[in-house]
Amino acid sequence: MATVYNPKLFIPSWKVPRIRWAGPDINSITFNSNSTAFGTYWASVFQAESTFTVTRVAFRQVARGGTGTKIVRIGIMNVSTTTGLPDGTWRSYTDYTVGTESNAMVSVSLTTTPVGQNANVTRGDVLALVIEPQSGFSGTETLQLSTNFGTDSYIDSISAFPYIATSGTRGTGSGISAIGSSTQWYGTPFGGINNYTHTSAEVGARIKLTNTNLSSFALQGIRFYHALNWSWDMSIKIYDSVSGTTPITNGTLTVDNEQTAGTSSFTRPFTYMFSNSPILTAGQYYYIGLSRASGTFDQVRPRLDFGTGNSAYFNALTPGWESCWIERSTPSSGTFTVTDTLRPEWDFIIDGVDVPTIGASGGGPVIGGRLIN
Protein backbone atom coordinates (compact mmCIF):
# COMPACT_ATOMS: atom_id res chain seq x y z
CA MET A 1 0.00 0.00 0.00
CA ALA A 2 1.09 3.55 -0.66
CA THR A 3 -0.13 6.61 1.20
CA VAL A 4 -0.77 9.60 -1.03
CA TYR A 5 -1.04 13.15 0.36
CA ASN A 6 -2.21 16.27 -1.44
CA PRO A 7 -3.45 17.86 -3.52
CA LYS A 8 -6.66 18.15 -1.55
CA LEU A 9 -9.59 16.25 -3.01
CA PHE A 10 -13.24 17.19 -2.63
CA ILE A 11 -15.74 14.33 -2.37
CA PRO A 12 -19.23 15.78 -2.75
CA SER A 13 -22.60 14.61 -1.51
CA TRP A 14 -23.93 15.71 -4.90
CA LYS A 15 -22.60 14.84 -8.36
CA VAL A 16 -19.70 17.29 -8.30
CA PRO A 17 -18.30 19.85 -5.83
CA ARG A 18 -20.65 22.81 -5.88
CA ILE A 19 -19.41 26.20 -7.00
CA ARG A 20 -22.46 28.39 -6.47
CA TRP A 21 -26.18 28.15 -6.00
CA ALA A 22 -29.00 30.65 -6.47
CA GLY A 23 -31.90 28.30 -5.88
CA PRO A 24 -33.28 25.00 -7.18
CA ASP A 25 -33.30 26.36 -10.72
CA ILE A 26 -35.10 23.56 -12.62
CA ASN A 27 -36.72 23.82 -16.06
CA SER A 28 -39.35 21.70 -17.81
CA ILE A 29 -40.91 21.00 -21.20
CA THR A 30 -44.41 19.92 -22.22
CA PHE A 31 -45.07 17.63 -25.20
CA ASN A 32 -48.46 18.43 -26.75
CA SER A 33 -48.08 17.10 -30.30
CA ASN A 34 -46.66 14.04 -32.06
CA SER A 35 -43.21 14.08 -33.62
CA THR A 36 -42.73 13.72 -37.36
CA ALA A 37 -39.39 12.87 -38.99
CA PHE A 38 -37.61 13.27 -35.66
CA GLY A 39 -38.77 16.86 -35.39
CA THR A 40 -39.91 17.12 -31.77
CA TYR A 41 -37.79 15.68 -28.97
CA TRP A 42 -35.86 16.38 -25.80
CA ALA A 43 -32.35 15.06 -25.22
CA SER A 44 -29.73 15.04 -22.48
CA VAL A 45 -26.21 14.99 -23.94
CA PHE A 46 -23.44 13.57 -21.76
CA GLN A 47 -20.25 11.53 -21.66
CA ALA A 48 -20.54 7.93 -20.52
CA GLU A 49 -18.99 7.55 -17.07
CA SER A 50 -18.24 3.84 -17.42
CA THR A 51 -17.98 1.03 -19.97
CA PHE A 52 -21.18 -1.00 -19.83
CA THR A 53 -24.33 -2.06 -21.67
CA VAL A 54 -27.23 0.37 -21.34
CA THR A 55 -30.32 -1.61 -20.38
CA ARG A 56 -32.49 1.15 -18.88
CA VAL A 57 -32.91 4.91 -18.79
CA ALA A 58 -34.78 7.30 -16.54
CA PHE A 59 -36.39 10.72 -16.72
CA ARG A 60 -38.38 12.88 -14.30
CA GLN A 61 -42.07 13.11 -15.08
CA VAL A 62 -43.75 16.20 -13.68
CA ALA A 63 -47.30 15.50 -14.81
CA ARG A 64 -49.43 14.21 -17.66
CA GLY A 65 -52.58 15.76 -19.08
CA GLY A 66 -55.54 13.75 -20.36
CA THR A 67 -56.43 10.09 -19.95
CA GLY A 68 -55.70 8.84 -23.48
CA THR A 69 -52.86 6.48 -24.40
CA LYS A 70 -49.68 8.41 -25.17
CA ILE A 71 -46.52 6.77 -26.51
CA VAL A 72 -42.99 8.20 -26.31
CA ARG A 73 -39.92 6.59 -27.83
CA ILE A 74 -37.08 6.77 -25.34
CA GLY A 75 -33.51 5.52 -25.66
CA ILE A 76 -29.97 6.46 -26.64
CA MET A 77 -28.39 7.93 -29.78
CA ASN A 78 -24.97 9.07 -30.89
CA VAL A 79 -24.27 12.80 -31.06
CA SER A 80 -23.19 14.51 -34.29
CA THR A 81 -19.70 16.02 -34.25
CA THR A 82 -21.00 18.65 -36.71
CA THR A 83 -24.13 19.89 -34.94
CA GLY A 84 -23.74 18.65 -31.36
CA LEU A 85 -27.27 17.23 -31.63
CA PRO A 86 -28.58 13.64 -31.49
CA ASP A 87 -27.95 12.10 -34.91
CA GLY A 88 -31.46 10.65 -35.30
CA THR A 89 -30.40 6.97 -35.29
CA TRP A 90 -31.53 4.94 -32.32
CA ARG A 91 -28.86 2.70 -30.82
CA SER A 92 -31.38 1.19 -28.42
CA TYR A 93 -34.87 2.26 -27.42
CA THR A 94 -38.34 1.31 -26.25
CA ASP A 95 -41.80 2.64 -27.06
CA TYR A 96 -43.10 3.58 -23.65
CA THR A 97 -46.71 4.18 -22.66
CA VAL A 98 -46.81 7.31 -20.49
CA GLY A 99 -47.87 6.48 -16.95
CA THR A 100 -49.58 8.45 -14.23
CA GLU A 101 -46.45 9.31 -12.20
CA SER A 102 -46.26 12.83 -10.80
CA ASN A 103 -43.04 14.58 -9.80
CA ALA A 104 -41.08 11.33 -9.85
CA MET A 105 -38.18 9.68 -11.65
CA VAL A 106 -39.47 7.07 -14.10
CA SER A 107 -37.30 4.08 -15.06
CA VAL A 108 -37.79 2.53 -18.52
CA SER A 109 -36.14 -0.70 -19.74
CA LEU A 110 -34.77 -0.61 -23.29
CA THR A 111 -36.25 -3.39 -25.43
CA THR A 112 -35.22 -2.77 -29.06
CA THR A 113 -31.77 -2.60 -30.64
CA PRO A 114 -31.93 -1.99 -34.41
CA VAL A 115 -29.81 -4.05 -36.78
CA GLY A 116 -26.28 -2.67 -36.91
CA GLN A 117 -26.65 -0.82 -33.61
CA ASN A 118 -25.79 -1.75 -30.02
CA ALA A 119 -26.25 -0.48 -26.51
CA ASN A 120 -22.63 -1.03 -25.46
CA VAL A 121 -20.96 2.23 -24.43
CA THR A 122 -17.37 3.04 -23.54
CA ARG A 123 -16.39 5.52 -20.88
CA GLY A 124 -15.94 8.89 -22.56
CA ASP A 125 -18.42 8.24 -25.38
CA VAL A 126 -20.62 11.25 -26.11
CA LEU A 127 -24.23 10.07 -26.10
CA ALA A 128 -27.75 11.44 -25.93
CA LEU A 129 -30.67 10.13 -23.92
CA VAL A 130 -33.59 11.06 -26.17
CA ILE A 131 -37.36 11.23 -25.55
CA GLU A 132 -39.59 11.67 -28.63
CA PRO A 133 -43.42 11.89 -28.55
CA GLN A 134 -44.74 9.27 -30.97
CA SER A 135 -48.53 9.08 -30.77
CA GLY A 136 -51.54 10.13 -28.74
CA PHE A 137 -50.45 13.70 -28.06
CA SER A 138 -52.61 16.78 -28.56
CA GLY A 139 -53.44 20.09 -26.93
CA THR A 140 -55.12 18.24 -24.08
CA GLU A 141 -53.12 14.98 -24.12
CA THR A 142 -49.75 16.12 -22.78
CA LEU A 143 -46.59 15.08 -20.94
CA GLN A 144 -44.56 17.49 -18.83
CA LEU A 145 -41.05 16.47 -17.83
CA SER A 146 -38.14 18.11 -16.05
CA THR A 147 -35.42 19.00 -18.53
CA ASN A 148 -32.42 20.57 -16.86
CA PHE A 149 -30.86 22.32 -13.91
CA GLY A 150 -30.58 25.98 -14.87
CA THR A 151 -27.60 28.27 -15.13
CA ASP A 152 -27.73 29.30 -11.46
CA SER A 153 -28.24 25.85 -10.03
CA TYR A 154 -25.84 23.79 -7.96
CA ILE A 155 -24.91 21.35 -10.74
CA ASP A 156 -24.59 23.47 -13.83
CA SER A 157 -21.83 26.01 -14.00
CA ILE A 158 -18.67 23.93 -13.71
CA SER A 159 -18.34 21.76 -16.81
CA ALA A 160 -18.95 21.58 -20.57
CA PHE A 161 -20.83 18.30 -20.26
CA PRO A 162 -23.63 17.57 -19.99
CA TYR A 163 -26.03 19.85 -21.89
CA ILE A 164 -29.50 19.51 -23.36
CA ALA A 165 -31.02 19.64 -26.85
CA THR A 166 -34.66 20.36 -27.67
CA SER A 167 -36.09 19.73 -31.15
CA GLY A 168 -32.88 20.66 -32.95
CA THR A 169 -31.66 23.43 -30.64
CA ARG A 170 -28.87 23.07 -28.12
CA GLY A 171 -29.35 24.50 -24.64
CA THR A 172 -27.44 24.89 -21.39
CA GLY A 173 -27.93 23.12 -18.10
CA SER A 174 -27.39 19.55 -17.00
CA GLY A 175 -30.20 17.27 -18.14
CA ILE A 176 -32.28 15.65 -15.40
CA SER A 177 -31.90 12.03 -16.47
CA ALA A 178 -30.05 8.79 -15.85
CA ILE A 179 -28.87 5.78 -17.83
CA GLY A 180 -28.19 2.42 -16.29
CA SER A 181 -26.90 -1.11 -16.59
CA SER A 182 -28.69 -3.93 -14.83
CA THR A 183 -26.98 -2.98 -11.56
CA GLN A 184 -25.89 0.67 -11.72
CA TRP A 185 -27.24 4.14 -12.50
CA TYR A 186 -25.28 7.04 -13.96
CA GLY A 187 -26.32 10.60 -14.72
CA THR A 188 -27.89 13.58 -12.96
CA PRO A 189 -31.28 12.53 -11.56
CA PHE A 190 -33.55 15.02 -9.89
CA GLY A 191 -32.68 16.47 -6.51
CA GLY A 192 -34.79 19.23 -4.99
CA ILE A 193 -33.86 21.45 -2.07
CA ASN A 194 -35.36 20.59 1.31
CA ASN A 195 -34.36 23.04 4.06
CA TYR A 196 -34.07 21.89 7.68
CA THR A 197 -34.44 24.32 10.58
CA HIS A 198 -31.70 23.32 13.01
CA THR A 199 -32.37 24.02 16.69
CA SER A 200 -30.88 21.81 19.42
CA ALA A 201 -30.71 18.48 17.54
CA GLU A 202 -27.62 16.79 16.15
CA VAL A 203 -27.80 16.43 12.36
CA GLY A 204 -25.38 15.64 9.59
CA ALA A 205 -24.18 12.86 7.32
CA ARG A 206 -23.72 9.11 7.37
CA ILE A 207 -20.81 8.41 5.04
CA LYS A 208 -19.01 5.33 3.73
CA LEU A 209 -16.30 4.86 1.14
CA THR A 210 -17.30 1.82 -0.94
CA ASN A 211 -14.43 1.92 -3.43
CA THR A 212 -12.65 -1.43 -3.15
CA ASN A 213 -9.28 -0.03 -4.27
CA LEU A 214 -8.87 2.04 -1.11
CA SER A 215 -8.28 0.95 2.47
CA SER A 216 -8.59 4.28 4.30
CA PHE A 217 -8.59 8.02 3.84
CA ALA A 218 -7.79 11.11 5.90
CA LEU A 219 -10.59 13.66 6.31
CA GLN A 220 -9.09 17.13 6.52
CA GLY A 221 -12.28 19.16 6.68
CA ILE A 222 -15.86 19.72 5.55
CA ARG A 223 -17.33 22.40 3.28
CA PHE A 224 -20.90 23.44 4.17
CA TYR A 225 -23.53 25.42 2.35
CA HIS A 226 -25.83 26.94 4.94
CA ALA A 227 -27.27 30.09 6.41
CA LEU A 228 -25.15 30.95 9.44
CA ASN A 229 -25.89 33.19 12.41
CA TRP A 230 -22.78 34.64 14.02
CA SER A 231 -23.98 33.74 17.51
CA TRP A 232 -24.30 30.00 16.87
CA ASP A 233 -21.11 28.09 17.77
CA MET A 234 -20.85 24.64 16.21
CA SER A 235 -19.62 21.28 17.42
CA ILE A 236 -18.83 18.64 14.79
CA LYS A 237 -18.16 15.08 15.92
CA ILE A 238 -17.45 11.87 14.00
CA TYR A 239 -18.76 8.58 15.42
CA ASP A 240 -18.12 5.05 14.19
CA SER A 241 -21.58 3.71 15.06
CA VAL A 242 -25.18 4.82 14.55
CA SER A 243 -25.60 5.31 18.30
CA GLY A 244 -22.12 6.60 19.04
CA THR A 245 -21.51 8.79 22.07
CA THR A 246 -17.71 9.16 21.92
CA PRO A 247 -16.05 10.64 18.80
CA ILE A 248 -13.27 8.75 17.02
CA THR A 249 -9.64 9.85 17.36
CA ASN A 250 -9.21 13.42 16.05
CA GLY A 251 -12.91 13.39 15.19
CA THR A 252 -13.98 16.55 17.03
CA LEU A 253 -14.13 20.06 15.60
CA THR A 254 -15.46 23.11 17.46
CA VAL A 255 -16.19 26.31 15.55
CA ASP A 256 -16.52 29.72 17.21
CA ASN A 257 -18.75 31.53 14.78
CA GLU A 258 -17.73 34.90 16.15
CA GLN A 259 -14.65 34.16 14.06
CA THR A 260 -16.63 33.56 10.87
CA ALA A 261 -18.57 35.72 8.45
CA GLY A 262 -22.25 34.99 9.01
CA THR A 263 -24.84 35.14 6.26
CA SER A 264 -28.58 34.70 5.97
CA SER A 265 -28.35 33.22 2.46
CA PHE A 266 -26.85 30.10 0.85
CA THR A 267 -24.73 31.87 -1.74
CA ARG A 268 -21.28 30.91 -0.47
CA PRO A 269 -19.66 27.94 1.22
CA PHE A 270 -18.04 27.71 4.66
CA THR A 271 -15.02 25.44 5.06
CA TYR A 272 -14.06 24.03 8.46
CA MET A 273 -10.83 22.13 9.10
CA PHE A 274 -9.96 19.50 11.73
CA SER A 275 -6.76 20.29 13.62
CA ASN A 276 -5.61 16.73 12.85
CA SER A 277 -7.13 14.65 10.06
CA PRO A 278 -9.18 11.71 11.40
CA ILE A 279 -8.45 8.48 9.54
CA LEU A 280 -11.57 6.76 8.19
CA THR A 281 -11.56 3.10 7.11
CA ALA A 282 -13.06 2.27 3.72
CA GLY A 283 -16.15 0.07 3.84
CA GLN A 284 -17.26 1.30 7.29
CA TYR A 285 -20.09 3.68 8.07
CA TYR A 286 -19.26 6.89 9.93
CA TYR A 287 -21.75 9.34 11.41
CA ILE A 288 -20.76 13.02 11.30
CA GLY A 289 -22.98 15.00 13.67
CA LEU A 290 -23.31 18.76 13.72
CA SER A 291 -24.80 20.33 16.86
CA ARG A 292 -24.94 23.64 18.66
CA ALA A 293 -22.05 24.28 21.02
CA SER A 294 -23.53 27.51 22.36
CA GLY A 295 -26.08 30.19 21.51
CA THR A 296 -29.82 30.01 20.98
CA PHE A 297 -30.40 31.07 17.38
CA ASP A 298 -31.82 28.56 14.91
CA GLN A 299 -29.95 27.76 11.69
CA VAL A 300 -31.12 26.54 8.28
CA ARG A 301 -29.38 23.55 6.65
CA PRO A 302 -30.16 22.89 2.98
CA ARG A 303 -30.29 19.29 1.85
CA LEU A 304 -31.03 17.48 -1.40
CA ASP A 305 -34.37 15.70 -1.41
CA PHE A 306 -34.87 12.83 -3.87
CA GLY A 307 -38.29 11.81 -2.62
CA THR A 308 -39.80 8.49 -1.61
CA GLY A 309 -38.93 5.68 -3.99
CA ASN A 310 -36.03 7.49 -5.66
CA SER A 311 -33.18 6.50 -3.34
CA ALA A 312 -31.80 4.02 -5.92
CA TYR A 313 -30.73 6.96 -8.06
CA PHE A 314 -28.21 7.97 -5.41
CA ASN A 315 -25.87 5.49 -7.10
CA ALA A 316 -25.94 7.75 -10.14
CA LEU A 317 -24.31 10.55 -8.21
CA THR A 318 -21.13 9.32 -6.56
CA PRO A 319 -20.07 5.75 -7.37
CA GLY A 320 -17.66 4.44 -4.74
CA TRP A 321 -19.04 6.77 -2.09
CA GLU A 322 -22.16 7.00 0.10
CA SER A 323 -23.54 9.99 1.95
CA CYS A 324 -27.02 10.57 3.39
CA TRP A 325 -28.81 12.60 6.06
CA ILE A 326 -28.84 11.67 9.77
CA GLU A 327 -30.61 13.24 12.71
CA ARG A 328 -31.12 12.63 16.46
CA SER A 329 -32.86 14.81 18.99
CA THR A 330 -30.11 14.84 21.64
CA PRO A 331 -26.45 15.45 20.73
CA SER A 332 -24.12 12.55 21.66
CA SER A 333 -27.03 10.43 22.87
CA GLY A 334 -29.45 7.94 21.35
CA THR A 335 -29.57 6.49 17.83
CA PHE A 336 -29.41 8.52 14.64
CA THR A 337 -32.35 8.30 12.26
CA VAL A 338 -30.93 7.67 8.78
CA THR A 339 -32.85 9.02 5.75
CA ASP A 340 -31.41 7.64 2.54
CA THR A 341 -33.52 9.88 0.28
CA LEU A 342 -31.84 13.04 1.64
CA ARG A 343 -28.26 14.28 1.32
CA PRO A 344 -26.71 17.17 3.24
CA GLU A 345 -25.17 19.94 1.18
CA TRP A 346 -21.64 19.08 2.25
CA ASP A 347 -18.36 18.43 0.46
CA PHE A 348 -15.71 16.34 2.22
CA ILE A 349 -12.06 17.43 1.95
CA ILE A 350 -9.60 14.55 1.71
CA ASP A 351 -5.87 15.09 2.19
CA GLY A 352 -4.60 11.52 2.11
CA VAL A 353 -5.67 8.09 0.90
CA ASP A 354 -4.19 4.61 1.14
CA VAL A 355 -4.04 3.27 -2.41
CA PRO A 356 -2.45 0.27 -4.16
CA THR A 357 1.25 0.63 -4.92
CA ILE A 358 2.19 1.67 -8.46
CA GLY A 359 1.87 -1.30 -10.78
CA ALA A 360 -0.61 -3.16 -8.60
CA SER A 361 -3.84 -4.36 -10.12
CA GLY A 362 -6.73 -1.93 -10.02
CA GLY A 363 -4.71 1.20 -10.79
CA GLY A 364 -5.05 4.57 -9.15
CA PRO A 365 -8.62 5.12 -7.99
CA VAL A 366 -8.60 8.89 -7.50
CA ILE A 367 -9.27 11.08 -10.54
CA GLY A 368 -10.07 14.74 -10.16
CA GLY A 369 -11.55 14.34 -6.72
CA ARG A 370 -13.91 11.59 -7.94
CA LEU A 371 -13.50 8.06 -6.63
CA ILE A 372 -13.63 5.57 -9.48
CA ASN A 373 -14.33 1.84 -9.14
Image (tube, grey):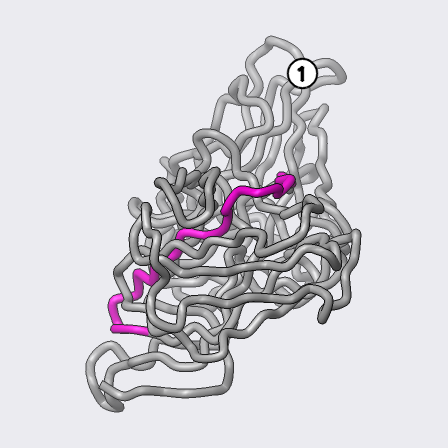
Which x, y percent locates residue 210? Answer: 30, 60
Residues 339 and 133: in front is 339
Residue at the (29%, 81%) spot, across then down? 355
Residue 185, how many percent across, how many down? 40, 49
Q: Name the residue: 50% across, 52% down.
A: 187
Residue 202 position, x and y percent, is: 50, 47
> Where 295 sits versus 195, above or below?
below
Residue 129 makes an appearance in the image: yes
In the rendered image, the quadrant that contains the C terminus is bottom left
Q: Is residue 116 visible?
A: no
* Residue 256 as seen in the image, left or right of residue 341: right
The residue drawn where x is 64% and y is 59% is 233
The residue at which mark 1 appears reads as 65
Closer to us: 369 or 244: 244
Count of numbered circles in the view: 1
Kind of element beneath mark 1: strand
Q: Quadrant of residue 3?
A: bottom left
Residue 150 pos. (x, y %): 73, 50
Seen in the picture, residue 333 relative to 12 is either above or below; the reply is above
The quadrant in which the N terminus is found is bottom left
- Camera-side residue of 305 and 126: 305
Quarter residue 103 falls in: top right
Q: Which residues are magenta?
A: 194-216
Was residue 41 drawn as part of the magenta stretch in this picture? no
Residue type (three-letter) at the residue carrying disc 1: Gly
What main secondary structure does the magenta stretch of the protein show?
strand
